[in-house]
Image: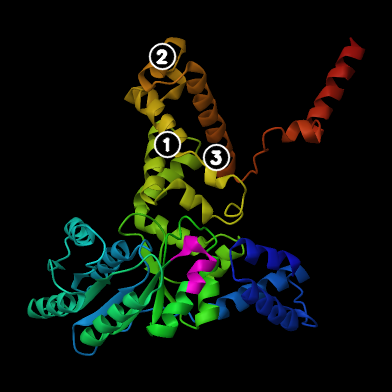
Amino acid sequence: MREVRLALLEADVNFEVVKDFTARVRERAVGQEVLKSVTPGQQVVKIVHEELTALMGSGDSRLAFASRPPTVILLAGLQGSGKTTAAAKLALLLRKEGHSAALVAADLQRPAAIDQLEQLGREIDIPVFSEERADPVAAATRGLEGAREEGLDTVILDTAGRLHVDEALMDELAAVRDATRPTNVLLVLDSMTGQDAVRVAEAFAERVAFDGIVLTKLDGDARGGAALSVKAVTGKPVKLVSVGERLDQLDYFHPDRMASRILGMGDVLTLVEKAEAAVEEDEAKELEQRVLKGEFTFDDFLSSYKMIRRMGPLQGVLKLIPGLGNLDGLENVDERQMGRVEAIVLSMTPQERRFPHVIDGSRRQRIAKGSGTTVQQVNQLLEARKQMAKMMKQLGKGKMPALPGQAMQNGPSRSATKKQKRKRKKKSRR
């Protein structure tokens, strides 16, 4: 329980929430029969995972839709929480689900807020309704009327924020809400602010009744303890999470997956979904067959590297892998190193990429010069490819390859010692 408590506190979960949670887990775990197939420790982790999932809400994080369109979604929050970007991301997500969405600029406080929303709308080809020099209520109602006239079924209102919670902000939000009667009021919170996110959520819950929460910048806060704290303190569910800077990186909230991330257990399901979206199945199968035969060329490296890049930033992908998410130094992963490797490969001729064994000394010098690297770095890459191809070939034959240095640690194998004995016998006979 001490380890669980530390994991939650490191994930920036509210102290009171951690205290109540660990008490509940202890009460449930003490005296419970341990299944034969698992250890007591695994049983406790299972209970912790189930309790975390239950605490963060049910699996249903879908938005409510009006019986008579348009459905109105009002986004509220402080300045800098990412409301405007979240509005565009939500519009894109809803369009993928078959809805016709529109954006309405009701943030007249922040300079260039309207320009930003219009630019995002052009990027994703979503209509934006805006009015200069109008009050927020008028801008919201006219935008809603415009969307209704064009037959659009979903309207997303981007409202103004402040640097802190104040009376003017709450009054303006209440006025826009009363005028538009939104189907969903979503509070946008920056997950990087940790405990401040909880305080902001409490303040909004007292003045503006919201239906759910949108957590932004979750790619910067791998664990996402704010999700647990906010739900426990306000009772409002987290509906959506933003996991990257790209406009297609907004998804519905899955409590079970977030529970795994908070505990540092990775998020395999999200990783699989990212891979399915980024990688063509035929392309992956063809690459897998070649790699397992030991035919790992630099062309294969380039195609696999592009697959990973399509899944998003390398650091974000690594955090989803169980066992890697809570490793120290993961935030220092340098994607430029991968870029240098790509430059070396692209400096090779098509023949050299397909048949790396033809790369001799003069070719290595030419590749190093063309990629802006050293001959030593080229040599390191060639050796790494050779080792990887050898290891994959062994895996393809169903053998477990020895790790580097493992043979030295374990000493000579039995077959090796037998060979040495036979050699010594031959010498003695001679």
Q: In the rendered image of this protein, does residue 305 appear above or below residue 377? A: below
Label 2: how many Cα within 10 Å (few below 14, some 14–19, many 20+): some
Label 1: how many Cα within 10 Å (few below 14, some 14–19, many 20+): some
Q: Residues under labels 2 and 3: Cα distance?
A: 26 Å
Q: Where residue 186 sits: x, y (%)?
A: 35, 76
**Residue 301 bears which disc, if any?**
1
Badge 2 marks a residue whose secondary structure is: helix
Residue underneath mark 3: 392
Q: Where residue 336 sits: x, y (%)?
A: 43, 35
Magenta region's main secondary structure? helix
- Residue at 44% x, 17% y is 359
Q: Answer with mark 2 or mark 3, whichever residue precedes in sequence.
A: 2
- Residue at 54% x, 73% y is 228
**Residue 363 bears which disc, if any?**
2
Which segment did they paint magenta?
Answer: 190-199
Q: Where residue 423 sits: x, y (%)?
A: 83, 19
